[in-house]
Structures are given as C-alpha cells and as structure tokens.
Image (cartoon, rainbow, N blue to C red):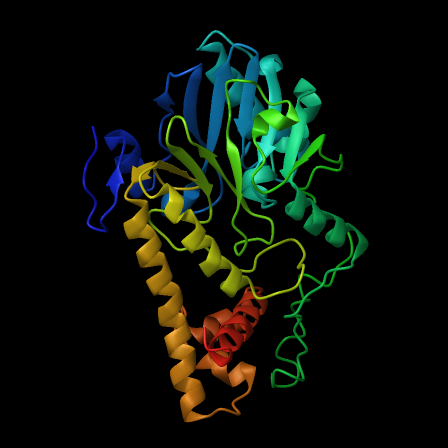
C-alpha cells in the first residue's frame, strides 16, 4: 500500500499519492476504524498540483460526525452548497450518515481553503464551531483593525521606488473580516494542549491541540496519541513548503522564528502518521521537518550573504536580490509583493538576531 518517496517520506495510500502528485483530486481514504471511522477527504479548490484540493478529516463516531477543516467554499453561499455541503452529504450517506449528523466543525487556521466552508456548514447542521484561541485573536484583530504587526510595510522606509506599490493596497491594512471567516464566534476556543473532548467534541476523538504558529499566528496541529496520528494542517506538507506570516491579522513577533520553533516542537510526533492540509498522508515526519528547516535556512543564508555584501541595503533592493519562484520582476508587479516584502523583513531580522 505504501510507497517510498525520494524525499525520505513514505506515502501511506498509493492511490491518494498518485492522484495528488498528478494534479488530480484524490478519492477519500479511511485512515482508522478504531472507535469509529476516520476518513480523509480531498475538497477541490482553485490551484494546481497538490494545491488543487485541501484535505479535510472526517470522524464518524457513535455520538456524531466531526469535520476538521471543511474546505474551500468559493465566494458565495451557493458555492458552499455545491463545493462543500452536497459532496459531504453524499460522502456521509454512502456510509450510513447524513449532513445533519455533523455535530462539530474544527478549524486548524483561518485561511479560506480550511475555514471557507464552515459558515454554511454550521448553518446547515447547527454544529458546534471550534477554533484555536490564538487564531480567534487574529480574527478579532482583523475585525477591529487592531493588528499588532511588526512587519507593516512603510513603502518609504523599505526604499520602494515612488508609485511602484500604488496599485496594490496593503492587505493587512483593511479593517473588517475577510468574507471567508464565519461571522459567528466559536462555541469553544481551543488552547495549546487542550483535548478536543474538553470542548464537547465526540468522546471517541481524544485529539490534543498543538500550537504551531508561523503559517498563521494561531495555527493548530492535532495529535491523536492513541492512534499515533498527527493532523499537521499546513505546518508541514509533503510536496511543497508552506508560506509564512499569512494570518488574517498579525499579533506581533517574527513568524519565521515562530515557524522554526513549531517545526522543532513536532519532533515529538516523528513516528506518527501525518495528515497534512494538502497532498497526501505520509510517514517520515523527521525527514520532512529536516527538509523544511533546510529550505527556510537556505533563504536565511541567501539574505545573510546579501547583508554581508551590503549591510545598509534597503528592504526593496534586498528582496530583489533573492530567489523567487517566477522571478522578482513579475512578483514585484503583483498583489503578492506585500507578502514578499514582509517575508524579506522577517528573514532579515532572523539573520540580524543570529538565529
């Protein structure tokens, strides 16, 4: 069933791995039958390769159905019905359940491909909504416009040429919730180390929350210590490396530094089976953590070499001397330029701190 990957990780389900790496949406796979059935479903989303779907974990228990990361819903309510609700209802009915049996919706982090389907799912089912305490703080900060951003971009301070950034507003400067965030507050917010059962989630699902900031400030993984499973969401992915510092609002601090600390924290689960947010389930977390850290440190090394050559270089010129997929010129003329500039600032600080 499993096949060794060149990266040192081992995909668990051959068909899921083949579909994901071929840019197709994988079929559902059953991960465990211990105390109910645990399934991983791929929910389609705009994107290419392994990013054409997000993996949603579904637990079918005696006391109800728990959905972790409902998936991408699109921009309208009817999109949620077409992309999230109806396929989930079909999936459940094939297994003797239905949409109305969903009792709990758990979200690892507030990105549209993970939380986007939650609002309509909550309305359709009356399920309880669970989000990490820290991630809810980012939602509240976005709602009020009180982001504590150590990397807010001042176009003059970074040395950007006049007018070059005018057509793209700074994405974290807006006050108000993005449309993909549920307007209702969570029924329970989850702290680092909490068991989901502490918050009323079905008794069979004794998952432990593990706070791994970096991708977003309040990103959560969930460890099932009995089954030796880790729902890693977007902190560690099998095929690509996650973006860093992409919360709906910032709570301060350096997300790159936080991300590296989160990678180290996951060493506890190196012998667990990993359910990532995209791609395919795998074992070999230690190897993938090492590769991911090396990727981050390669970027830090690139920044370090430029700073050694010119310690006074502006952030704008520093960003232009780094390696970006697609090239700096095209990136600088796109809405993603803000993320690139912010990450350049984060890596510069990481290097200057000697991390």
- Residue 269 placed where, x, y %? 38, 42
- Residue 204 placed where, x, y %? 50, 18
Task: Using the image as rendered, state which of residue 287 and residue 89 is in the foreground.
Answer: 287
Task: Using the image as rendered, state which of residue 347 and residue 205 is in the foreground.
Answer: 205
Task: Using the image as rendered, state which of residue 189 and residue 103 is in the foreground.
Answer: 189
**Picture quadrant of residue 264:** bottom left
Does any portion of residue 82 appear in the rendered image? no
Task: Please tell me whether residue 236 is drawn above or below residue 298 in the rendered image.
Answer: above
Q: Is residue 23 left or right of residue 129?
A: left
- Residue 156 placed where, x, y %? 67, 84
Q: Residue at x 48, y 82 (%)?
A: 318
Quarter of the figure that contains the N terminus: top left
Q: Residue at x 27, y 33 (%)?
A: 12
Q: Residue at x 54, y 71 (%)?
A: 346
- Residue 241 placed where, x, y %? 39, 55
Does any portion of residue 347 appear in the rendered image? yes
Q: Is residue 288 left or right of residue 5?
A: right
Quarter of the figure that contains the C terminus: bottom left
Task: Please tell me whether residue 26 is drawn above or below residue 258 in the rendered image.
Answer: above
Report how many numbered discs are placed on residues in the image: 0
Instruction: Residue at the far right: name it.
Output: 144
């Amino acid at each position: 069933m499993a096949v060794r990957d060149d990266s040192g990780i081992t995909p668990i389900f051959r068909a899921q791995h083949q579909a994901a790496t071929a840019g197709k949406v994988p079929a559902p796979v059953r991960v465990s039958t211990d105390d109910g059935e645990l399934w991983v479903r791929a929910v389609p989303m705009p994107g290419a390769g392994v990013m054409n779907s997000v993996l949603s974990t579904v637990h079918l228990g005696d006391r109800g159905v728990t959905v972790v990361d409902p998936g991408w819903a699109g921009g309208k309510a009817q999109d949620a019905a077409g992309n999230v609700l109806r396929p989930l209802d079909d999936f459940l009915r094939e297994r003797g359940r239905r949409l109305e049996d969903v009792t709990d919706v758990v979200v690892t982090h507030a990105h549209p491909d993970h939380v986007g389907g939650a609002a309509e799912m909550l309305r359709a089912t009356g399920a309880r909504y669970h989000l990490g305490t820290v991630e809810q703080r980012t939602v509240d900060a976005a709602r009020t416009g009180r982001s504590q951003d150590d990397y807010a971009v001042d176009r003059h301070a970074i040395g950007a040429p006049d007018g070059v950034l005018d057509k793209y507003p700074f994405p974290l400067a807006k006050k108000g919730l993005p449309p993909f965030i549920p307007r209702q507050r969570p029924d329970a917010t989850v702290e680092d180390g909490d068991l989901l059962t502490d918050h009323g989630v079905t008794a069979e699902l004794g998952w432990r929350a593990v706070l791994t900031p970096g991708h977003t400030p309040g990103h959560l993984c969930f460890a099932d210590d009995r089954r030796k499973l880790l729902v890693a969401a977007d902190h560690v992915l099998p095929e690509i490396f996650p973006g860093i510092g992409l919360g709906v609002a910032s709570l301060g601090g350096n997300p790159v530094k936080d991300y590296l600390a989160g990678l180290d924290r996951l060493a506890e689960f190196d012998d667990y089976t990993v359910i990532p947010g995209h791609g395919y389930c795998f074992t070999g977390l230690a190897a993938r953590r090492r590769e991911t850290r090396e990727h981050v440190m390669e970027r830090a090394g690139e920044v370090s070499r430029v700073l050694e050559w010119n310690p006074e270089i502006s952030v704008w010129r520093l960003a232009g001397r780094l390696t970006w997929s697609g090239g700096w010129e095209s990136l600088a003329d796109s809405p993603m330029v803000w993320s690139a500039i912010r990450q350049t600032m984060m890596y510069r600080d990481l290097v200057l701190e000697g991390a």
